[in-house]
Image (spheres, coloured by chain):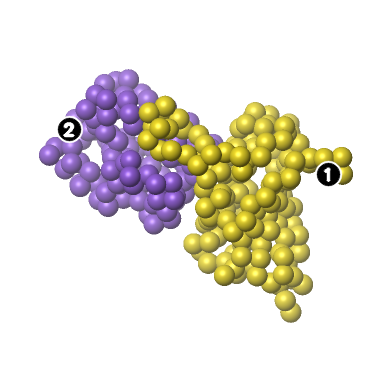
Chain colours: A purple, B yellow
């Protein structure tokens, strides 16, 4: 039984990842693999929707650090959206809002790519 | 009756496997809730213990699930919770880890090194005691006060 799952949807030229459950040192490799696969397939506009994510530790945050420079170098980005307060707290503790584009709603993140 | 009467030290034994993190968080959350912490602080305490145990499992124990460590929780007076993580790995003082520089880490594609910073930010005190002739295990002590 997995306590973490990822669903993906392609929205135009943007790949949206829907995270659910608990993202920790045990489940982070699954997310890293999913993002790596999308990037290898040529996708560089990524949105990560945290609406159904209940918990994140620094192992989860580290996944975004691995890829952010790579996607930005090709004109893309990883935009993060719809975090619960508890999840945002962890990003905020480490100063991630300075480095990452974090929006309240998925539509805002998607709109930024098409702007 | 004071908390120290009803709340005695409890120990969770865990192995060097990241699947243990969920059980560890649950154990810590239950005890922190029983002690009277707010939901916000229960989350922070469980996060700090998760970070410490993640580092221990991945680095000191190299994901070796035959190795065990302990998470001890005990009250210190009525207003302070003490969590101690005891391990048999190579001694490593997490307090020597520098504060991460996000831009530099991103440029280096680094995904680790944040856990210790989180622990220091959310706990009131953090101390590390490497094993010595009188203490067989390394001990990381995390302290959180109710107010």
Viewer-side residue, B28 vs B134: B134
Labels 1 and 2 in the same subunit: no
* Disc marking residue B135: 1
Q: Kindly indicate the quadrant of the structure image that contains residue A46.
A: top left
- Going 62% across and 56% down the picture, which residue do you hit? B125
Viewer-side residue, B108 vs A70: B108
Question: Number of numbered discs present?
Answer: 2
- In the rendered image, residue A9, in percent from the top left (x then y), is placed at 27, 35
Q: Is residue B79 above or below residue B21?
A: below
Q: Is residue A68 above or below residue A3?
A: above
Residue A43 appears in the figure: no
Secondary structure beneath disc 2? Answer: loop
Viewer-side residue, B44 vs A38: B44
Q: CA distance from mark 1 to mark 2?
A: 60 Å
What's the chain of the residue with tag 2? A
What's the chain of the residue with tag 1? B
- In the rendered image, residue B16, in percent from the top left (x then y), is placed at 67, 35
- Going 40% across and 32% down the picture, which residue do you hit? B104
Secondary structure beneath disc 1? Answer: loop
- In the rendered image, residue B27, in percent from the top left (x then y), is placed at 64, 54
Q: Is residue A34 left or right of residue B61?
A: left
- Asked if disc 1 and disc 2 are in contact, CB closer than 8 Å, the reply is no
- In the rendered image, residue B42, in percent from the top left (x then y), is placed at 55, 60
Q: Quadrant of the C terminus of chain B?
A: bottom right
Viewer-side residue, A77 vs B34: A77
The extreme left residue here reads A115
Q: Is residue A52 above or below residue A69?
A: below
* Disc marking residue B17: none
* Disc marking residue A12: 2
Residue B76 appears in the figure: yes
Q: Quadrant of the N terminus of chain B?
A: bottom right
């Amino acid at each position: 039984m997995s306590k973490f799952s990822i669903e993906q949807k392609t929205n135009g030229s943007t790949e949206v990842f829907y995270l659910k459950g608990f993202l920790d040192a045990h489940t982070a490799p699954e997310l890293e693999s999913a993002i790596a696969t999308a990037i290898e397939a040529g996708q560089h506009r990524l949105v990560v929707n945290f609406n159904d994510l209940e918990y994140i530790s620094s192992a989860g945050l580290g996944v975004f650090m691995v890829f952010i420079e790579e996607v930005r170098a090709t004109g893309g980005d990883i935009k993060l959206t719809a975090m619960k307060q508890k999840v945002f707290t962890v990003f905020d503790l480490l100063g991630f809002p300075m480095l990452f584009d974090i929006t309240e709603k998925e539509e805002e993140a998607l709109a930024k790519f098409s702007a | 009756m004071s908390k120290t009467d009803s709340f005695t030290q409890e120990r969770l034994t865990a192995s060097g496997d990241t699947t243990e993190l969920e059980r560890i968080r649950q154990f810590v959350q239950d005890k922190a809730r029983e002690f009277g912490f707010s939901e916000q602080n229960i989350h922070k305490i469980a996060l700090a213990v998760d970070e410490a145990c993640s580092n221990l499992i991945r680095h000191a124990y190299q994901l070796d699930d035959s190795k065990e460590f302990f998470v001890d929780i005990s009250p210190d007076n009525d207003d302070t919770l003490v969590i101690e993580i005891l391990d048999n790995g190579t001694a490593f003082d997490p307090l020597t880890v520098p504060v991460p520089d996000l831009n530099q880490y991103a440029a280096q594609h680094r995904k680790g090194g944040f856990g210790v910073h989180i622990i220091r930010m959310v706990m009131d005190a953090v101390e590390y005691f490497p094993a010595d002739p009188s203490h067989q295990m390394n001990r990381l002590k995390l302290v959180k006060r109710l107010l």
